[in-house]
Image: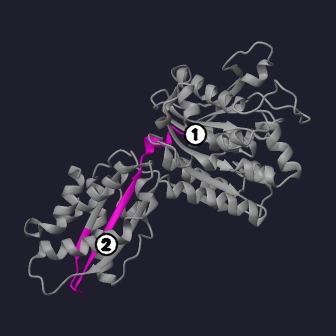
Amino acid sequence: MSSRRLIVATCVAVTVVITATACESVQVDRVNNERAEQTRPDLPTSASLTDGARAHSRAQCQARTADPSDDPTADYGPEPAIALRDLVASAPLDPSDPDPGSRNGRATTLIWAEWEDEPTLTDPAWDAIGVGEHECDDGRLYMTLVLRDDPDAASCRGTAAVTSRNLAYRTVAGVNPNLLSLDLYEPVRPAACPPSPLVVYVHGGSFRTGDKANKIADKAALFTAEGWALASVNYRLSPNPPNDLPGQVRYPVHEQDVATAVSWLTANASNFDIDPTQIVLLGHSSGAYLVSLLSTDTSLLTAAGVDVANIRCTTSLDTEYDAAAQIALGGAQEILYRNALGNDPATWAAASPINHVADPGPHPDFQVFTQGSARRTNGSKAFAAALVAAGTPATALVVNQLTHEEINEAVGAPGDTLVTPPLLDFFRACVSGT
């Protein structure tokens, strides 16, 4: 048991020594314990936030309610803030318990049960916390928790982007250099900012068409505005039109190329002010298949020299996860996957992300977008469920309002409400220091 967890337990179990302010500190410890589990830095306690939280709890006692502030800037100032978020709750105090520490400790635990699953507690943007409680004459404990967004962090969001095109990440004789290159979009930020997290995007195109420049403008604007770098990666393509000829590009060449690109980016991170320990993968269609396979069969990344622990999360934009099942459908799907993987059923199994969810980790957290038929969406949900069953956090989002292409086009598109907000929330939770 960690020291922070021991402190939390002591607040509840060793109640003789508890005071009201001690229980405020315990809630702070609980928040920082949650953040530590997601490798977020501890939040220091702010005196002004604490004073404001106590005042708000007193006001809620008088109003006999437990509502957030209508004017957080006025109530929780005067320290500068880009944003403030408060959580407010109350819990009954046991009138039969004469010990205020014990009484408040139990009420504090009831309040924590309301708050502990709030995703905002582990948001990397917060830089300070304050907790204030008030023992009310109505027999309840009122408690307010306030989080503050760091103004300095906001200054590290990008104001523009610098683009480097056609960076060669490897050279293979006889191969078009464009297929083994990437475009890098770097955010313009103050020199004092820490290195940027990196989003690696892999395009789709049925493994045989597509390019790193396709549908990239909105993505580059979105991620560089967050203060993150974006690398859009090309890779060698399978034959177009499809054929069964020997010596063609098939599995695992696509995967190896993308893994090599990630390795090149980490090796050259200092040249581009990139944090090589804060990488997220994003792919659409066949590109989503590739990042999903790299994130489950992590031996491909390891073989390229990538520390898999540095891949923080993966978002898959509408793909399939079981090659054999796709080939069994016949028609266009069979042609697509035979052209990309070959004709050996053992290869189909080895190349299917669904077959690697229980492989030794670590595996990055997953976000899976899907649309279309029940068969397709159920397959995506089954993949996410298999990841969860194997111990990897994963969510599946069905967006049947969009087509297969529109899911990709939605990322960063002005006015999009279906893909961009949950994707940004997921990525923000994956990286820290932004």
Q: Residue at x 31, y 77 (%)?
A: 90
Q: Residue at the spot x=35%, y=55% of the render?
A: 34
x, y (%) of residue 278? Answer: 50, 36
Residue type highlighted by circle 1: Asp
C-alpha gap between disc 2 and disc 1: 41 Å
Q: Quadrant of residue 383?
A: bottom right
Q: Helix, strand, or loop for circle 1?
A: loop
What mark, if any, has residue 111 been given in the picture?
A: 2
Residue nearest the observer in this picture, 63 or 7: 7
Specify the segment rendered in magenta.
133-157
Q: Which residue is mark 1?
A: 297
Check disc 1: other Cα within 10 Å, few if <14, some if 14-19, many if 20+: many
Image position, residue 79 (x, y; %): 35, 51
Q: Quadrant of residue 384?
A: bottom right
Q: Is residue 163 visible?
A: yes
Residue 280 belongs to the span the image colors magenta: no
